[in-house]
Image (cartoon, rainbow, N blue to C red):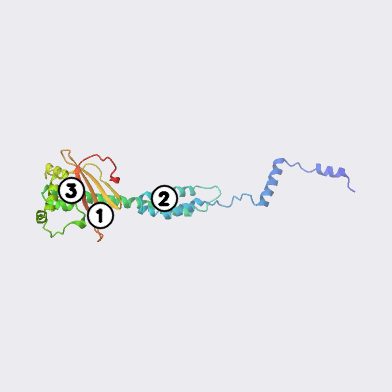
Amino acid sequence: MSDPTDVSAESSSLPPMGMNELSMNELGGMGAETGYGLDESTPPLRFSGFVSLLLGLLSWVSILVLGAIVIPILAVLIGLVALRPSRFGKPVGTLPAKFGICLAVGFGICGYLVPYLKTQTLGGQAKAFAMDYIDVVNSGYDTLGIELKKEKRNRFSKEMPLDDHYDGSEQAAELLENFEADGGNSIIRQAGPDAKWELDRPMHVFRQYGIDRAHLVFRNERGTLLQFFMHYKIDGNDVGQWHINRVQPYRELIVAESVL
């Protein structure tokens, strides 16, 4: 039978264990058993990288709708968040983030350039058409000027003798008389054929109700302002053509052109 004093002596001979060491051992054991121990060798998972890839794939919409340019911007921002460094190794999801950023940048650039180039092209055409109209009115070809104010589908053929037509009926003659008395055309005639008309401000080309439109303001060397409102329509043969909707002395717009 053992002596209780021997047990006490044996216990007293053991090295003392601090509370911190005991707590860490106990917590470590509990973490191992329950599966909550942190394994620093496992790289983190970045879901934002996959979100960036998804948004990058959806960025093609910005080519069709200019307002959708926000999609590639979000894809780039979220992708950059996914690419932030980690002290636990290379995160999972960085490769999709890189692909998402590349797609977003490519589609975003196209989404900006396509409308820009279209606006520049249509604007150049509208300016040239307006200058042709000014030359026609200055040359006294009022019947041809009337045709330029019509939609392409409503114009007479090139073989049509316009002067005979507008002199041949009372309704056509009245249309010619109204054209001659038009305020915008009067300004063009008063300025004369030697007047130098230049754009007074950047052209405003916009799209409304499925129709491309242009608002141009010209100024001559005397400071006279002339205002053009134009439409661009494509006919059934897929051929587009500008026509003059209205020419008038310059007036400040009470409402935006987009709601006219």
C-alpha distance separating marks 3 and 1: 19 Å
Local crowd size for mark 2, using a 10 Å CA cut-off: few (<14), some (14–19), many (≥20): many
Q: Mark 3 or mark 1: which comes first in sequence?
A: 3
Q: Mark 1 Cα within 10 Å, few/some/many (few <14, many 20+)?
A: some
Image position of 122 with respect to 187: above or below: below
Q: Amino acid at mark 3?
A: Met
Q: Which residue is mark 3?
A: 131
SS of the residue at dot 2? helix
The quadrant of the image that shows the C terminus is: top left
Q: Which residue is mark 2?
A: 71
Residue furthest to the front in view is 170
Image location of residue 218, percent across then percent down: 20, 43
Identify the disc placed on residue 233.
1
Marks 2 and 1 sit apart, C-alpha to C-alpha, by 30 Å
Q: Is residue 65 left or right of residue 6?
A: left
Residue drawn where x is 13% and y is 52% of the image: 171
The quarter holding residue 64 reads bottom left
Q: Is residue 91 left or right of residue 134?
A: right
For discs 3 and 1, the disc positioned in front in the rendered view: 1
- Seen from the viewer's position, the closer of residues 73 and 7 is 73
In the figure, residue 17 lies in which quadrant?
A: top right
**Amino acid carrying mark 2 in the image:** Ile
**At 48% from the left edge and 53% from the top edge, which residue is drawn?**
50
* Label disc, if present, on residue 120 of the rendered structure: none
Mark in front: 2 vs 1: 1
Pointers 3 and 1 in contact (C-beta within 8 Å): no
> Residue 192, position in %: x, y?
11, 43
Of the residues under marks 2 and 3, which one precedes in the sequence?
2
Q: Are marks 2 and 1 in contact (CB under 8 Å)?
A: no
- Closest to the observer, 168 or 14: 168
